[in-house]
């Protein structure tokens, strides 16, 4: 049997979009198409810097509409994205190897701002369902990141304290949620945010890509001294 507890970590939790799944561009394209169809001209590049909060907040900030109009546009966006764009979402480079390498060592979970059913569908499409325990979506607790409740829910399901867990994400909301939940290891990936933005939001470590995350976490799980430096950068492709 493979030993599933080692080093300073008992579990690793992940964000999904922009962290494991290469979905940020397709989300932006689906949203831009939806907004354009309703007379709001924009483009994916203008939308992506707003990503991180609830999509209705993204819509309000991006095109300057009120809550009621954002709600209406969001309701149109959902089927457009889930039916037309999500099925073709690929993994980010190195995601499969990272998940498979960690899954034989300790429990894994997902904490995402996607609807739980959508997250489960995407994970199944990518062939990862067997590797994850808790999958917490925006509707699982009814509370979204940057609040701590989604991460606390996943930790409770695993029976693990935050001080023995890591969370991997790509936005300020990810890092803020993990910090508020008491997660000790908060790894930011610079997919759509800068190193500085992630560290200021609470990241203890920043990586440029998933191979670097893999090297960092495997070293930590194996108990290598100094594998998880506070507020340090693990840059490159595979070097912690």
Image (cartoon, grey):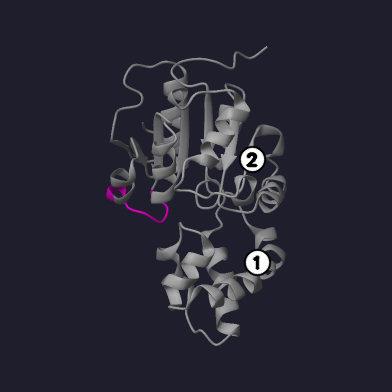
- The CA distance from mark 1 to mark 2 is 19 Å
Coordinates of residue 1 in the picture (x, y in percent): 68, 11
Q: Say which residue appears at 46% left-offset and 31% top-offset.
A: 166
On screen, 215 above or below 60? above
Sequence-wise, which precedes: disc 1 or disc 2?
A: 1
Quadrant of the frame with the C terminus: top left
**Residue ranking furthest to the bottom:** 39
Residue 233 visible in image: yes
Residue at mark 1: 78
The one of 191 and 158 positioned closer to us in this rendering:
158
Question: In x, y percent, where is residue 144?
Answer: 52, 50
- Apparent side of residue 136 relative to residue 219 in the rendered image (left or right): right
- Which quadrant of the structure image shows residue 230? top left
Q: Secondary structure at mark 2?
A: strand
Identify the residue position indicated by label 2 in the image. 135
**Residue 170 in sight:** no
Region of the chain picked out in magenta, as a range? 190-196
Tag 1 secondary structure: helix
């Amino acid at each position: 049997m493979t030993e599933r507890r080692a080093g300073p970590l008992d579990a690793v939790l992940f964000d999904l979009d922009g962290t494991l799944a290469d979905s940020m561009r397709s989300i932006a394209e689906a949203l831009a198409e939806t907004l354009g169809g309703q007379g709001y001209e924009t483009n994916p590049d203008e939308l992506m810097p707003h990503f991180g909060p609830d999509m209705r907040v993204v819509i309000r900030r991006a095109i300057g509409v009120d809550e009621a109009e954002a709600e209406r546009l969001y309701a149109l966006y959902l089927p457009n994205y889930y039916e037309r764009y999500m099925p073709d979402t690929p993994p980010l480079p190195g995601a499969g190897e990272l998940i498979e390498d960690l899954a034989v060592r300790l429990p894994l979970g997902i904490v995402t701002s996607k609807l739980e059913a959508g997250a489960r569908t995407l994970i199944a499409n990518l062939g990862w369902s067997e590797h994850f325990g808790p999958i917490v979506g925006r509707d699982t607790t009814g509370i979204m990141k940057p609040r701590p409740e989604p991460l606390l829910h996943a930790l409770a399901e695993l029976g693990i304290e935050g001080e023995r867990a890591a969370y991997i994400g790509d936005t300020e909301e990810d890092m803020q949620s993990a910090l508020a939940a008491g997660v000790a290891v908060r790894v930011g990936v610079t997919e759509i945010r800068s190193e500085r933005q992630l560290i200021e939001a609470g990241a203890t470590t920043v990586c440029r890509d998933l191979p670097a995350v893999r090297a960092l976490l495997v070293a930590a799980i194996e108990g290598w001294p100094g594998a998880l430096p506070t507020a340090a950068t693990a840059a490159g492709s595979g070097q912690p």
